[in-house]
Image: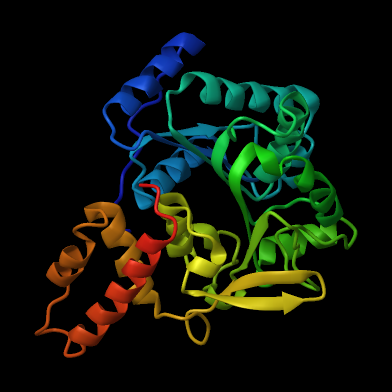
Amino acid sequence: LRGRYFIIDRVRPIDTEKEFTHLIRMEMDQSSRRELLVFIHGYNTDFRSAAERAAQLAVDLEIDGAPAMYSWPSRGTTLGYFADANQVIRPVINDLQSYLELLVAESGADRIHVVAHSMGNRFLLRALEEMAEDNPAPLEAPLFDHVVWASPDVDQEDFLYSIPEMLHLANDMTLYASASDRALRLSRRIQGGYPRAGDVSPAPVVLSGLATVDTTAAGDSGIGHSDYAGPALDDFRAIVWHSLEPDQRCILEPAESETGRFHRVDPEDGGACAPDVFKYSITALRRAGPEHAIDAVMASLDEDDDPDVSDRVEAISRYIALIISTRLPN
C-alpha cells in the first residue's frame, strides 16, 4: 500500500477560482466516491515539499476524487521556526477560510477530509473558529466529513478552549498525538514549557466529540512527528475509508488518564486484533466492497506461504462482518 514514488514535473499557476474549481469538479466527475482530501502542511515545508506530501497522502489513502492543499508562506528551513510562527496572522487565516469555503461550495465533493500537520494546525484552528462563527450549530449537514489534527503544534489550553465551538463543522474530528514527538518537545521548550496539543505528556487532550489517538507505542526511531502518515496510517485509512469510530477500530486499545478516555495504537500488546487483520479487512472492504471483501482477502492470501491462513481468514472475516454491521458509508 506504500512505496509508490513520483516527482512533481511542473507547477502551472491557475489564473482564476473558476478554473480551479472546474478542474476539481472534473476530477470528481471521473470518480465514484467524489472524495476531496485537503492537506495543510507544517513548519519547515516549502511549496514543493507540501505538494509532494499532499500527493503522497492522497496515494496512501487511495483518494477517489481529488487532493488539494493549502500552502502558507513557510520559510522551508529548520531555522525558520519563529518566522513561520509569525505567519499565523489574520490575512493568511482569512485566506485559508476563504479557500475552505470555496471547496465546500464549489468542489462538487460528497466527502471532504481535512488534515493539518504540525504548525499548520494553528492556521486551521483559527480558520475553523471563523467558519464556526459564520455557521453556528446546528447545521443541516456538517461542512466536512473528517477533520484530522495531526501532531498539532498548538498551545494545549488554546486547543482545549477552541475545539468545542467547531465540532459541529465535521462529522468526526480526530487528534493524533504522541509522547515521543521530538519536534513538539522542542517546540514546548521554545514556547516556555507550555504543553502542545499533539503531546500526550503529562496527559493527552481529551474532549467530548474529539477522538484522541496516542501513537507513542507505534512510533519508529525517527522524530515521531508524522505518525499519522506512517505507523498510524492504517488507523487513518479506517477513518477516511469507513468512518469507523475508535471503539470500532480493533488495533486501538482504550485507555484512561486524568483528563479522560482516549485510545492507543499499540502494535505489540494493544488492540483486539492483529495489525495485519485490521489492514486486510479495511483494505478489502475499500477495494472490493462488502459483497466481495472476503473473496478478495482469500485471493490475496497464499496458503502455501502462510500455514495459518485459515485462522487469519476467519479472523478477518469476523472483523469485516463487524464493520459491515456497524457503520460503512462507502
Image spot of residue 148 (x, y percent)? 59, 49
Judging depth in this view, the residue of 176 and 52 nearest the camera is 176
Quick check: 136 left or right of 63? right
Q: Residue at x 21, y 57 (%)?
A: 291
Vertical comparison of 307 with 316: above or below? below
Image spot of residue 118 (x, y percent)? 65, 50
Quick check: 15 left or right of 298? right
Residue positioned most to the bottom:
307
Snapshot quadrant of residue 207? bottom right
Q: Is residue 111 visible?
A: yes
Image spot of residue 64 (x, y percent)? 33, 39
Vertical comparison of 49 with 180: above or below? above
Q: Residue at x 81, y 69 (%)?
A: 259
Residue positioned most to the front:
325
Judging depth in this view, the residue of 133 and 153 nearest the camera is 133
Quadrant housing the N terminus: bottom left
Q: Residue at x 46, y 42 (%)?
A: 54
Image spot of residue 298 (x, y percent)? 16, 71
Judging depth in this view, the residue of 141 and 160 nearest the camera is 141
Quick check: 267 left or right of 320? right
Quick check: 35 left or right of 169? left
